[in-house]
Amino acid sequence: MYNRKSLHLFLVGLAGITLLGASCSKVKDLYNETDTGSDSLSLFPDGVSVPTDFMWNSARAVDVRIAVDDKFSGKYFYRVDIFDNDPALGAGANLLAAGQAKSGQDFVGKLMIPTIAKYIYLRETSPLGVAAVSMIEVGQQNTINVDGTKAGSSSKASVLRAATTTNAMASSGLKAATVEATPVVVPGDAIALSGNSTISVESNKSYVVKSGVTFTGKIDANNGTSNVKIYIQGSWKNTSFELNLGSNNGLYVTQAGSIDLVNVTQNTVGGFVNYGSASLSKMETRNNTLYVNYGTLTADKADITNGNFTNYGVATIQNLSSTTGGTVIRNEGTLTVQNATLTNATLEAVCHTVINSLTTNGATISIAQGALLSLDKLDAGGTKINLASSAILDVKTLAKFNSQASTMNGPSSGQALARLKKVDVKDQNMAITYSGNLEIACSDHSANGQWNTFYVVNSPAKLVPYDKSTVVIAGTSCNAGGNNASGGNPNDQTVTEVKLGTYSYAFEDNWPSIGDYDMNDFVVDVAITKVQNSANKITKLKLVNKIRSVGAKNRLAAAIQLDGILATNVKSVKYTNTNLVGQNLPLGSNGVESNQKYAVVTLCDDAHKAFGISDTQFISTQNGSFQPVESEITIEFNTALDNFTFADLNSFIITNGYKVSSRTEIHLVGYKATDKMNKTLVENQTAKGQLSANDPFRSSKGEPWGLSIPVSFVYPNEYKKITGVYPKFQSWALSGGSQDTNWYIK
């Protein structure tokens, strides 16, 4: 709007009487005044210019193609929905596009993505009614391709990221392959042990508790000796003795043997191998030692530090801990742990592994093909969880992921399943990232914030309801029966109406002069509903409009040109509030403005009268006492449209002369005027250097007269400059839109 301070007293001669005129409504035409150049009549201080290529966009158009992984050979439709935010937020997530797809018919469309959005959310609903959600990083791509038929693939034209998971079977430094896999052979010269005496061993010698013998004594192996081997064929029982194997010494329990000790500790290279039965209060490894269990092992506490522990048999441990990198705990049998704490260590679940409570920090967890890692509770930070094809992670109660970002990776081919009863990300940024061919079955997952990312599901990974897993995994002895996909009768998942979000259009009315930049001279919210056929073609459009403010003293009209849509392709237009239209902007028989090449629909002929106001007072820019004026426009087409989104809405206001064929229009930067625009005025003002030579709706300093915002905009009050009300607005504009993209979020 123009600056009141620029008004001068003027004289109107009537019967010789001189009158002072202070009413802006009596000013014939201030819209052709030149800019004074003062800071009060410019968006930014003198000398500050906006990048010449900045389009003032808070959203951008992206082409998208979705190919579903059709399990029904094209017999039924899948539903495809794309959101700007986590659909779990409900009203906090706006639908960007929707339609149906199947084998032979991809979903193809165009999206308007808010520049604030780092990810978009893809929800695919199968013919069985199972909704799977994944996330796609937006980046700067102009085209997004999601090919569900080639899960894990990626290309320069696609924002899909292939999984980079390590093979769950691999483990650096693991020495299990060198362990004897056949029963131990006791050397013939092994020294027999019996009774309850204390034995001090000697280097390079072997000792044995023979079959049928129970040894209750002690063995001093930490006495500086090395290469000592102790064999148990019978039984060694001493519940008060803590065995320290010393350096490079070994303890071997044969298939018929058993031990019952307080502790087994290894200081340096050496090991403990159990083929029989071992009962310990504590088991400790130190410095590259290797403990292996082929038989039955029970321990109240196991501290695996530096060394490694591999289980091929049945192991039950109450409290398991490891605090060093390079340590590997590997299960190829049945391992049951009550409480486990792993810091920088590696856990390899090659077969059925059960842990009641697992706490990790900087750890790596690998689940092998066909294996199951079953947890009651998981509390993870900075942890890498890798699942091979047909692997299952099952967290029965709660999985927590904290601020040290964790990752969960599925395989590059095949599928893996993470069955998580409840996930809590503690509102921490990027707490967990799911990737690869991984299905996360969870119905109680923390949602992302409206514009904050606490978790990521990188396509082709997907999130499905807890009881609706679609991954079929055959049962084996290592996965407790595997996983069978939910059944049911398939049905088409069709989409007939697509309700997109709301955009605000906010205008200054002083074009071609600069206004006060309170951006409230005309503000309207527009929501789009698309009516589609089975080929995702648009047969009707519904524009729900809400005029919210008129901070102007001049008469205004407002309309929308449907860019690229010929007026002749419009079959009919229905206006729910006919009192708003048809007076100043003449309509043709099909309901669009007459004598226009492209379809133009009217929002209001007179913005003030739309509120029932006969004069031109400010409306809802000072005290908000007026209720918004709502209306709906339904547009039916002769030929269905391939695409339509907010990018195709060319919203504009008419500031004077709208009763004649040549008029003044104000559009957004980057949009063209209609056929009825006063082009001579554009040419004159451009020649004077007042307008950009490349865009008549951008000033010579790059300033706009209109903004499109992908939310219902909280516009400034009268005379409140937008740069003061929104502190991030200036840095957003001067950076060309690369910084503070959330400037409009309060």
Image (cartoon, rainbow, N blue to C red):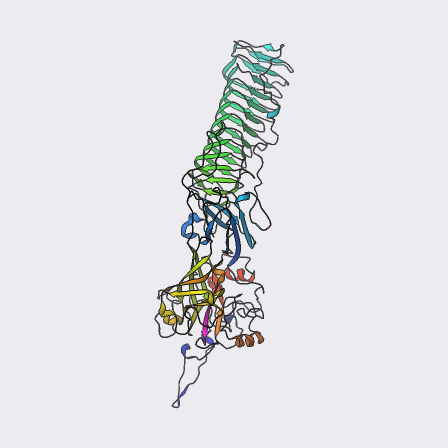
Q: Is residue 92 left or right of residue 145?
A: left
Name the chief secondary structure element in magenta. strand
Seen in the picture, residue 444 relative to 590 is either above or below; the reply is: above
The x and y percentages for residue 352 are: 49, 28
Q: Which residues are magenta?
A: 649-658
Is residue 173 on the magenta stretch? no
Viewer-nearest residue: 610 or 644: 644
The x and y percentages for residue 508 are: 47, 69
Is the C terminus in the top left, top right, bottom left or bottom right quadrant? bottom left
Q: Quadrant of residue 588?
A: bottom left
Is residue 655 on the magenta stretch? yes
Viewer-nearest residue: 6 or 218: 6
Seen in the picture, residue 629 relative to 360 is either above or below; the reply is: below
Q: Residue furthest right?
A: 204
Seen in the picture, residue 578 relative to 86 is either above or below; the reply is: below
Evaluate whether residue 711 shows in this view.
no
Count the labels in the image: 0
The x and y percentages for residue 80 are: 46, 49
Evaluate whether residue 414 shows in this view.
yes
The x and y percentages for residue 179 are: 60, 22
Q: Residue furthest bottom?
A: 16
Q: Residue at x 43, y 65 (%)?
A: 571
